Amino acid sequence: MTNPEYDLRYVGAAGEILKDYLLSKDIYRPIGIIADLGEPPYPQLTLGNMLLALQRAQAKTTTTQQRSNLHDLKDRVDIIHQDWRVAWENKAREEFRARLRLWGNYLDDFRKDPELHASRYSYEVGRRVLLEILHVEAHQVPSEQEALLDGMDKLVHAFFIHDRFIWEPELISQFPEITYWYLYGYLPSKLLSTF
């Protein structure tokens, strides 16, 4: 569990190098900050990771100072987005393709050995969340990638056990079930049938 300051620091650091990142060939770039003791290491900078951190921060900010910082950070990101829209969309498409491959690899592993891989679902499903976020930002995901994601969603649906929200409860407001249905349950460790 992280606090809002964790995500605000990440977005702040991302904002400092966002333009250069968007204009680079990198999908992943070191963020250049170190997490406080007891916090998880910061992920590399990607467009998806930054947008996810913004959503988490929005759900977790409680103080006036945190809200003010979040507002300033969102403004900075929005200006860069407007000024570099084509680069932003291209970066979103590149990351979408990379995340789609990783999500597919996990689902293949799960199908082959559910007992070994089902317990990783709450972590791995973060890739599916990023795909949702990136899909909106990319605007024109190739149709074959959309079809592949649709097939993956059907696979998850076939085995999915609906349950409670699996991430931190305070994040529910930013991840409603109608869109992020895959965060409201889990995959079983034993399958009755295989695909």
Image (spheres, rainbow, N blue to C red):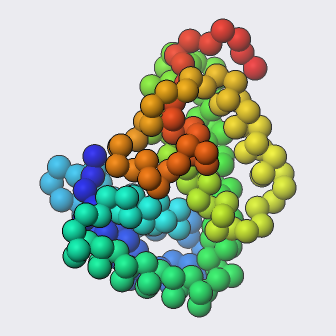
Residue at point 43%, 85% (across, down): 76
Query: On screen, 14 above or below 44?
Result: below
Left or right: residue 19 versus residue 170 is right
Residue at point 59%, 90% (across, down): 83
Residue at point 67%, 74% (across, down): 89
Q: Quadrant of residue 136?
A: bottom right
Q: Is residue 60 visible?
A: yes
Given residues 82 and 26, the one toward you in this image is 82
Quadrant location of the C terminus in the rendered image: top right
Query: On screen, 85 above or below 53?
Result: below
Query: Where's residue 81, x and y in %?
Result: 56, 82
Given residues 141 and 24, the one toward you in this image is 141
Query: On screen, 49 above or below 109?
Result: below
Point out the residue furthest to the right here.
Answer: 143
Query: Where's residue 121, x and y in %?
Result: 49, 32
Point out the residue furthest to the bottom here.
Answer: 83
Left or right: residue 143 versus residue 113 is right
Point out the residue furthest to the left here.
Answer: 37
Q: Is residue 117 visible?
A: no
Q: How many marks?
A: 0
Residue at point 51%, 88% (across, down): 79
Query: Where's residue 80, x and y in %?
Result: 52, 86
Query: On screen, 155 above or below 31?
Result: above
Q: Quadrant of residue 59?
A: bottom left
Query: Where's residue 47, x and y in %?
Result: 53, 67
Left or right: residue 78 versus residue 30 is right
